[in-house]
Image (tube, helix red, strand yellow):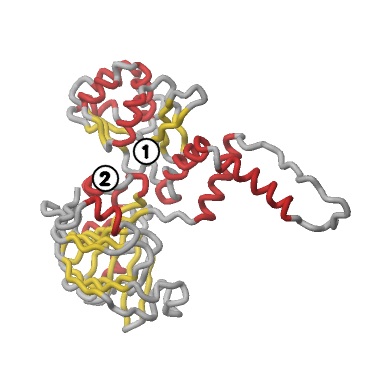
């Protein structure tokens, strides 16, 4: 976990999270950057990788280029004042995905992705604010950060620029960051980071932002897919001599009461939110692994045999797992597993294993063998492996053979 130094985790969660920025010096003292500028540039040449280049051309003049790029793109860039940004790096590089383990003091399902930027001296993406939370980890080089809480409104922007940058930016705080330092920024706080050298690499651990309209639409889709909430609207008692075209307060209240009844269904709401929180965005969905074909799939007995030769399983970094516990009509509790926006079939799977599977990024051989004393746990693992949502951390050629 990151080091909060003089600020306790409890203080961060109650006083800073989604409220105000926090500077954490040497928050990851043993951090080692796992990607070079050249490797990041190489990824930006790939069609399936989302990348951008931002070039500052004047005080308030910026050019935005969208990837994939070519080698010729980099040959034409100026010596200073440009930044390369690559999204979804946690889905591409296992060592980058490992960084997320240091942020498990917040729900993993809240994380969107890790974006990594490389900037030459003077490189920046302009003064701006976001609608989501972000931790900015300085991985290499130095960067100057300026912050403001003022004028963070949608009408404060520079016109004629493809990026939504702040026209007015009144600096309230300023810091210089070195490798291992972290800056936490909540939604709607202006920030402007400028590279101080040609080695500047920054990891942006971004969290999802949920708009009310997005939640409402998703909940409606969930109810439709589940065939739920088919209760009919009922009229109020109509007055005599009504106006035939009037939508009355009483009629509106009846509709409100009906809608409120489904919002008061805690299990339905919780089940929907589990699906919503694990839903993949379009880019991530395209990066899901290919499931094993019938010809590639061994028997479950062979699969379990492979598990007994010191194998471990790790989640594909694209996949999003979560769980919830709901109370059933008989008063007993039931654990639900959500993967990539779906409620997973867990018939007779042990609740403890559901929780373990959702919480951990990988399972050791010892944990697997203990869980697989339950044959239903075995079947769940086998199904997820066939989909390649779980893959072997292969330790010998046999494991490599059955996993390909």
Q: Depth-wise, is mark 2 or mark 1 nearer the camera?
A: 2
Residue sticking out furthest to the left: 30
* Left or right of residue 61: residue 251: right
Residue 190: percent from left, percent from top: 34, 71
**Residue 270 vertical placement versus 110 (above, below):** above
| Numbered tag placed on residue 104 in the rendering | 2
Is any atom of residue 41 visible in this view?
no
Residue lying farthest front?
240
* Element carrying mark 1: strand
* Numbered circle sitting on residue 321: 1
The x and y percentages for residue 83 are: 28, 69
Decide which of 98, 72 is in the foreground and name it: 98
State the residue at coordinates (47%, 39%): 270
Give the numbered dot on residue 298. none
- Judge the density around disc 2: few (<14), some (14-19), many (≥20) Cα neighbours within 10 Å: few
In this rendering, would 206 be left or right of 139?
A: right
| Residue 100 drawn above or below residue 7 | above
Residue 21 at x, y = what percent?
28, 64
Nearest the camera: 297 or 252?
A: 252
- Image quadrant of residue 223? top right
Residue 342 locus on image (x, y percent): 47, 36
* Among the two numbered marks 2 and 1 on one chain, the one whose residue lies closer to the N terminus: 2
Give the class, few, some or many, for how many residues have Cα within 10 Å of label 1's Cα (few <14, many ≥20): many
SS of the residue under disc 2: loop
Residue in view at x 42 percent, y 40 percent = 340
Residue 388, image quadrant: top left
Q: Is residue 312 visible?
A: yes
Distance from the alpha carbon under mark 2 to that under mark 1? 14 Å
Residue in view at x 39 percent, y 74 percent = 165
Determine the residue positioned at 29% across, 49% down: 90
Disc 2 and disc 1 in contact, CB within 8 angstroms: no
């Amino acid at each position: 976990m990151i080091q909060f130094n003089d600020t306790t985790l409890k203080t961060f969660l109650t006083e800073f999270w989604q409220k105000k920025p926090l500077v954490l010096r040497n928050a990851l003292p043993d951090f080692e950057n796992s990607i070079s500028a050249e490797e990041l540039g190489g990824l930006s040449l790939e069609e399936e990788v989302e990348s951008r280049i931002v070039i500052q051309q004047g005080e308030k003049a910026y050019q935005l280029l969208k990837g994939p790029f070519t080698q010729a793109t980099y040959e034409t860039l100026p010596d200073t004042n440009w930044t390369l940004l690559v999204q979804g790096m946690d889905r591409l590089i296992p060592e980058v995905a490992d960084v997320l383990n240091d942020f498990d003091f917040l729900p993993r399902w809240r994380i969107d992705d890790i974006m990594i930027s490389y900037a030459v001296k003077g490189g920046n993406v302009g003064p701006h604010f976001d609608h989501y939370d972000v931790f900015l980890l300085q991985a290499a080089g130095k960067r100057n950060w300026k912050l403001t809480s003022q004028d963070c409104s949608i009408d404060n922007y520079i016109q004629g620029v493809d990026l939504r940058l702040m026209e007015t930016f009144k600096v309230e705080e300023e810091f210089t960051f070195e490798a291992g330092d972290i800056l936490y920024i909540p939604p709607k706080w202006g920030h402007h980071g400028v590279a101080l050298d040609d080695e500047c690499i920054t990891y942006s651990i971004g969290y999802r932002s949920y708009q009310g309209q997005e939640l409402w639409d998703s909940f409606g889709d969930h109810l439709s897919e589940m065939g739920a909430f088919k209760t009919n609207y009922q009229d109020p008692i109509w007055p005599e001599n009504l106006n035939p075209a009037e939508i009355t307060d009483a009629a509106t209240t009846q509709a409100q009461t009906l809608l409120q009844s489904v919002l008061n269904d805690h299990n339905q709401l919780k089940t929907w939110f589990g699906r919503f929180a694990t839903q993949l965005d379009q880019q991530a969905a395209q990066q899901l692994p290919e499931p094993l074909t019938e010809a590639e799939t061994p028997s479950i007995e062979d699969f379990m045999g492979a598990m007994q030769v010191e194998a471990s399983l790790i989640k594909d970094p694209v996949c999003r797992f979560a769980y919830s516990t709901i109370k059933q009509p008989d008063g007993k509790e039931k654990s639900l597993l959500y993967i990539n926006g779906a409620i997973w079939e867990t018939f007779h799977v042990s609740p403890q294993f559901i929780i373990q599977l959702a919480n951990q990024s990988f399972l050791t051989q010892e944990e697997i063998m203990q869980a697989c004393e339950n044959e239903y746990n075995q079947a769940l693992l086998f199904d997820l492996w066939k989909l390649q949502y779980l893959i072997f951390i292969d330790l010998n050629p046999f494991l490599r053979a059955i996993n390909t």
